[in-house]
Image (cartoon, rainbow, N blue to C red):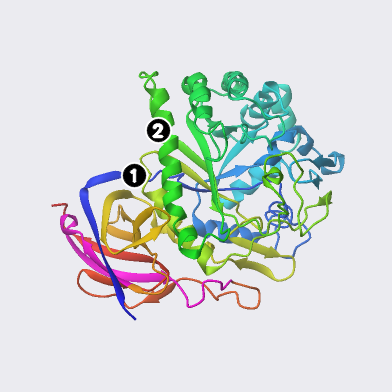
Amino acid sequence: MTTKRATLHANGWFQIGRTDDRLWSSFTEHLGRCIYGGLYDPDSPHSDDLGFRTDVQDAVRGLGLGLVRYPGGNFVSNYDWKDGIGPVSDRPRRMDFAWSSIESNRFGVDEFLQWAERTGVEPMLAVNLGTGTIKDAAELVEYCNHPGGTYWSDLRRANGREEPYNVTYWCLGNEMEGSWQAGHMSAAEYAGKAREAAKMMRWVDKDIKLIACGSSYHMLPEYLDWDRIVLGELYPYVDFVSTHYYTMNSGQGDSAFLASYADLDRHIKNAAAAVDFVRAKNEDCPPIPICLDEWNVWNFQDIKMDSLDDLLGKTTFEMTSAQPWEEAPAILQEQYSLLDALTFGGLGITILNNVDTVAISCLAQLVNVIAPITTDPVKGLLKQTTYYPLEQLTTRGRGTVIQTVVDGDTYTVGDQQLPIVHAAVVLGDDDTITVFALNCDLSESTELELDFSSLGTIHLREHRTITGDDLSVRNTWDEPDAIGTTALTPSTGNRVTLPAASWNILTFDRDGALT
């Protein structure tokens, strides 16, 4: 077996930016078993006195997430938050048109905010700007954040919560440019409604932070024009603009799927360019960071797709794993492979290399639905292959991200020549350096030379990797540890060997100042 070669150049004086405390966040939606059977399962022996699964809470705490977004997603555009408060026995059962399911409303805003407190994460709530009204949105802020003495704040107190929740982060709807969205609007219609919602919500609480819906997906005809029109109206009213990104293994070949990180990089830079364009006309306003509030590998393993109409709202979603109008059906429970984990890790590296524009990124989703965590009522909790790169990113991917250049061997995807190694370098506040490195060669190891001369004297303390001989291997209940992180013997000097088809975490101790 031959060995590929590459050199990673990193100069500590050339910095992309610092990671935001909210960079590594996640997303939960009333979809499938994400909430019911995931976060909340009162009948499970794994649950606490409020019905929250403690094994899920422990796994989430281990990730050290910043924000968790709730309750959607497509679900929110047909959701009345008032259905999910008060005595559970009085809450109505509704049709969830987004996912052709039945919503029991046993879990609502109070339950989620209590779950967030117990789990140690900060909530980010989305308001319904599809079928909901701007008054509904302002009243939700009142219910959550006003101390008392008004109808909705006193109702919260009557429902058992005396002190306000003080929710800071609020999404102004979800994917409103998509024809699949309940209450879909044009850019001008959305901008007007979101502007008025923002005004009223801030009248209730001036300290909240607002996220506008930007362009979700590049294949839509409104792509980027949507951002231009929406931000042209909303720029002075919002603090972030969202975008979404999913990648799918759809038969394009393993190397092309692995190279999804390059597509995400273009997607982020396009969103940033749209923000810069509008800011040029709003020079007195500060920059608006990007909130990548949905991203993941999503292979659509159980969605019936006869044509693009099945994704564009012209038909209802049909699943191979459930019938329409089931309650909390076991849908979108992707089973992730080693290849998925490597691709996922590549996306994480790209997010790090764009921290100058991306402040928040929410993995979609957290539990059971296209998620790194799977639960079973009896068996407990399974960490999927994607859990392990996420865990490394959230725990080690914090600090100052250094600009990098990789030269050496390349590989070809379409009309692109890409370096054989995709990498990010993070300078930690504890004088450690963490290198995340994806070896994109699926059959050969790569010898990676490290040109870190400006960073002082470095010593490789730890080399961990995610790899294997079979890209299709998954973690299962019978073999829960088939894929995880494996420690390799640290090399000496300035060269390390990255196994074929591997995602690597290199931790260096650093002596001395930048030179």
Above or below, 465 relative to 32: below
The answer, for residue 339, to whether it is visible in the render is yes
Whether residue 166 appears in magenta in the rendering, the answer is no
Above or below, 143 relative to 313: above
Whether residue 463 appears in magenta in the rendering, the answer is yes
Amino acid, disc 2: Ala
Assign a secondary structure to mark 1: strand
Q: Position of residue 381 (x, y in %)?
A: 64, 66
The residue sitting at 74% across, 65% down in the picture is 377
User: Which residue position holds label 2?
Assistant: 273
Report the span colored magenta.
446-474
Answer left or right for 500 relative to 400.
Answer: right
* Mark closer to the observer (1, 2): 2
Q: Where is residue 127 in the image (x, y as percent from the top left)?
A: 65, 32
- Give the number of the disc on residue 18: 1
The answer, for residue 390, to whether it is visible in the render is no
The residue sitting at 45% across, 72% down in the picture is 467
